Amino acid sequence: MKYLRFFLCLVAISLTACMSHVFTDTTTRLQVENKTDVTILGVDIISEDGTSVQPWIRDAIEPGEKSKVVEEDWVGTFRVRVRFDKWDGMHSSQAMACEKRPWVVQALAKQGEPNVFEKEVKGCGEEDVHMIYSETTLDFEGGSQHLIVSQDEDGNVAFKLK
């Protein structure tokens, strides 16, 4: 009888844990909508100290388009980097990413945009990468999220989560 009670308690606890997983989202499904006039090359999660970057959305998102929905284990507050193809750009350079996939970035012609950055990044031992990006901090609560990337009349990038 003692073992039967122990077994029933163990089953009840394990079922409770399974049911809490149903009600608590531990992953976030993200879709990005591009309302800017430039192509978005991808969306990355950046560590607090800025030393590591984890790609989330890897597909290019043309102006006016939406990305496919991508699910990852990101729940909480994270630094997010959105990479742009150009921002009033003039010339382009080809580089090789760490994942051995080619991607094209373009140089920033319009200097001084307050929230669009231009940076040379070490390219995993192959060559340096010229990157144009904007960063923000977003709070992902789990479940389905829709990130709208737009720009205001001054050309600043704006982020809105729905």
Image (tube, grey):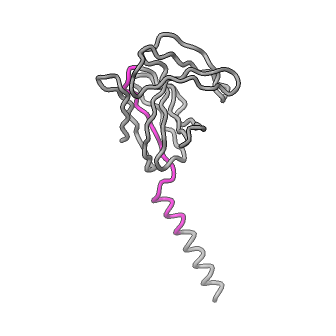
For the view shown, which residue lies furthest in the bottom direction? 1
For the view shown, which residue lies furthest in the right direction? 125
Q: Is residue 36 magenta?
A: yes
Question: Of residues 67 and 50, which is closer to you in this image?
Answer: 50
Residue at 37% across, 40% down: 161
**Residue 140, image x and y in percent?**
44, 47
**Residue 115, image x and y in percent?**
41, 28
Which stretch did the figure color magenta? 16-37
Drawn side of residue 123 relative to residue 148, left or right: right
Q: Is residue 22 above or below residue 84?
A: below
**Residue 25, image x and y in percent?**
48, 54
Drawn side of residue 53 relative to residue 126, left or right: left
Q: Quadrant of residue 151?
A: top left
Q: Is residue 94 above or below residue 2?
A: above
Question: Of residues 121 and 15, which is closer to you in this image?
Answer: 121
- Locate the N terminus by quadrant: bottom right
Q: Quadrant of residue 14?
A: bottom right
For the view shown, which residue lies furthest in the left direction? 153
Q: How many numbered discs sit on the rendered protein?
A: 0
Q: Quadrant of residue 147?
A: top left
**Residue 71, image x and y in percent?**
52, 43
- Locate the C terminus by quadrant: top left
Residue at 56% across, 20% down: 130
Q: Is residue 89 magenta?
A: no
Residue at 45% across, 22% down: 39
